[in-house]
Structure formats: structure tokens, C-alpha cells
Amino acid sequence: MDVRSTPSYLYWLFCQFELITCSYLMEPWEKVLFYSFNLAMLGLLLYTTYVCVAFHASSAFQLLCSFLGNPRENALSVVK
């Protein structure tokens, strides 16, 4: 993909997004609210995904280490 065509491709994607969501019919203040809400939800989704994936990866790594014979913590501390 050519670097010079990237802005036009991004503009084309934005136009497709407006057509799919019918946001091209909205007034400017409605677009601001709509896009702000969508960006906030996307941000929350990405943050939650980042936190959950990090937690699950850490748990899986600890479980793998305990299976390989290198327990990081005592079994009694897990029960407590």
C-alpha cells in the first residue's frame, strides 16, 4: 500500500463507517455526542481487555510454573 494513498483510504473507511451507522444524516452536535459515546465505550473495552488479559496471563503463568515444579507460593497461602 502506498503511503500517499493512506489518507484517502482512511477517508474511505470513515465514509463507510458513516454509511453503516447512518451518522451522515445526523446534525453536527448529534455526531459529536455519538462519536464521543462510541470512543468512550471503545476506550473502556480496550482498558478492560488489557486488565483482564494481564490478569489471566499472570494466573496461567503461575499455574504453569507450579506444574513445572517451581511453585511461587505455598499451597496454604493459596487457600487463605
Image (cartoon, rainbow, N blue to C red):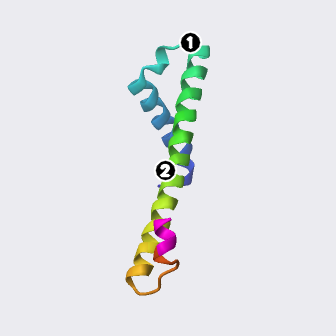
- SS label for mark 2: helix
Residue at the disc numbered 2: 49
Q: How dense is the environment of label 1, judged by Cα within 10 Å: few (below 14), some, or many (20 and up)? A: few
Q: Position of residue 71 (x, y in %)?
A: 47, 82
Residue at the disc numbered 1: 27
Amino acid carrying label 1: it is Glu
Q: Position of residue 31 (x, y in %)?
A: 56, 20
Q: As drawn, which residue projects farthest toward the bottom?
A: 69
Q: Residue at x 51, y 14 (%)?
A: 26
Q: Position of residue 47 (x, y in %)?
A: 56, 47
Instruction: Pick the residue in front: 79 or 12.
Output: 79
Decide: is 20 above or below 54: above
Give whichever of discs 1 and 2 has the lower sequence position. 1
Of badges 1 and 2, nearer the viewer stands 2
Instruction: Pick the residue in front: 77 or 39.
Output: 77
- SS label for mark 1: loop
Q: How dense is the environment of label 2, judged by Cα within 10 Å: few (below 14), some, or many (20 and up)? A: few
Q: Residue at x 47, y 58 (%)?
A: 53
- Circles 1 and 2: CB atoms closer than 8 Å: no
Q: CA distance from mark 1 to mark 2?
A: 33 Å
Amino acid carrying label 2: it is Thr
Q: Is residue 61 magenta?
A: no
> Which label was assigned to residue 65?
none
Question: Magenta segment range?
Answer: 76-80
